[in-house]
Image (cartoon, helix red, strand yellow):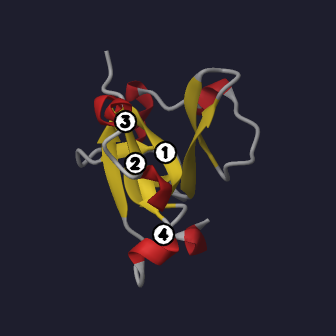
Amino acid sequence: MREHKYRAWMKKEFSLPKATYDTFTIQELMTGKHNFSKYENWEEYTGLKDKNGVEIYEFDLIKATRHTSNPKTRVVTYDIDKGAYFVVKNSLEETKWNDCLTREQLTRFGYEVIGNKYQNKEML
């Protein structure tokens, strides 16, 4: 069973000059001890790690390091209708099952987290 964890970005007025985030487990969220009003842009942990052991969250930007002659930046997104995470060109793109983010895909393509859509908008 995967670990249920979330990453939340602090609103600009709490994190100037640089965007910052905190991570929370599902247990921490349920206790009600935190002031969640200072956060926005919540992302769920996929339960997967990239080739360097970095946790992969929804809206992370990843790049293939193997089996590609022209590596492109992709966004990790969750398709609620399909109940799975996908690797797509942008978070509005329609998901296809062959783009599903799986352990096998991580191994095959050697995906590496290179940023996220909130700190690295220029990479999209």
Q: Which mark is residue 7?
A: 2
- Cα distance, mark 2 to mark 3? 11 Å
Instruction: Mark 2: give few (<14), some (14-19) or many (20+) Cα within 10 Å.
Output: some
Q: Which of 69 and 13 is in front in this view?
A: 13
Q: Which of marks 1 and 2 is nearer the N terminus?
A: 2
Dot 3 amino acid type: Leu
Q: How far apart are marks 4 and 2 (CA)?
A: 13 Å
Circle 1 Cα neighbour tier, 10 Å, few/some/many (<14 / 14–19 / ≥20): some
Q: Are marks 1 and 2 in contact (CB under 8 Å)?
A: yes
Q: Which amino acid does label 4 sit on?
A: Gln
Which quadrant: the C terminus? bottom right
Q: Nearer the viewer, mark 2 or mark 3?
A: 3
Asked if residue 20 lies left or right of residue 60, the reply is: left
Q: Is residue 19 above or below residue 45?
A: below
Would you say residue 64 is visible in this rendering?
no
Q: Which mark is residue 119?
A: 4
Helix, strand or loop at label 3? It is helix
CA separation, marks 4 and 1? 13 Å
Which mark is first along the chain, 3 or 4?
Answer: 3
Q: Where is residue 66 in the image (x, y as percent from the top left)?
A: 40, 47
Which residue bears the numbered disc 3? Answer: 29
- Disc 1 target residue: 43
| Residue at x-position 56% and y-position 25% | 84
Seen in the picture, residue 102 relative to 62 is either above or below; the reply is above
Residue at the farthest top position? 1
